Image (cartoon, grey):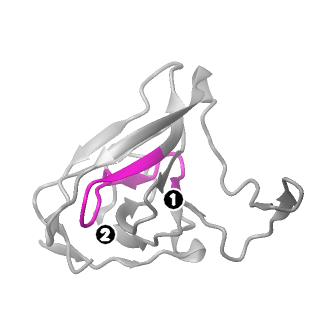
Amino acid sequence: MRIELKPEPLTREAFAAFGEVIETAGRDFFHINYGHTERYHDLMTLDALEAGGKPTVSLFRTQPKAFPMAVEVLERHPVGSQAFLCLERRPFITVVAPPSAGDQPDLSQLRAFRVGADQGINYRRGTWHHYLFSLEQPADFLCLDRSGGEGGNCDEYRLKPSVFIVDP
């Protein structure tokens, strides 16, 4: 059976089952630096300390994909969250499925979101997701996640070529 995912706009409500939307729109701020800077504080929860882990900041450089694009693999991080912000402030696509108790995602609950140029995402612990890619040109993403500690923090599930992202 072929599944086609058409990316929908990313909103806090639509993404709540998968994690948090990182954005300043509609958020409170306070002034710092003698009134020259707005600080939007505590925009997400970094979940990184389970089993002796520590917060890590990394840079991911991604390449663009052509559409329709086959979704070949989903991954999840069972002991920590994983957040992404595009440093060039460009839109990108994320594909997600809710956390599951077993070792595979529920493909009937797959969703694709178009992340706006002024947004980022924080996948909740255990959320299945496709790896990042850029839309039109290479892009750099700041990644905030967990490293170290006990046990692995990345499970992968390979899909048969039956899920496609169309019309981004």
| Mark 2 Cα-neighbour bin, 10 Å: few <14, some 14–19, many ≥20 | few
Is residue 139 located in the magenta-colored stretch of the structure?
yes
Quarter residue 52 falls in: top right
Residue at 36% of width from left, 70% of height from top? 111
Percent position of residue 45, x then y? 66, 49
Which amino acid is tagged 2?
Ser
Identified at 22% across, 59% down, the residue is 64
Label 1 to label 2: alpha-carbon separation? 22 Å
The quadrant of the picture occupied by the N terminus is: bottom left
**Coordinates of residue 28 in the picture (x, y in percent):** 80, 69
Residue range in magenta is: 121-142
Nearer to us in this view, 66 or 36:
36
Q: Is residue 10 left or right of residue 68?
A: right
Quickly name the residue at label 2. 108
Residue to which mark 1 is pinned: 121
108 falls in the magenta region = no
Look at label 1 and name its amino acid. Ile
Could you tell which of marks 1 and 2 lies nearer the N-terminus? 2
Report the number of numbered marks.
2
Nearer-the-camera pick, 106 or 47? 47
Q: Position of residue 129 (x, y in %)?
A: 36, 54
User: On the picture, is 64 further left or further right than 93?
Assistant: left
Residue at 74%, 71% in the rendered image? 27
**Which of the two marks, 1 or 2, is nearer to us in this view?**
1
Give the residue at the far right of this rendering: 34
Query: Crowding at label 1, few (<14), some or many (≥20) Cα neighbours within 10 Å?
Result: many
121 and 106: which one is in front?
121
The image shows residue 146 at horizontal and vertical percentages of 53, 33
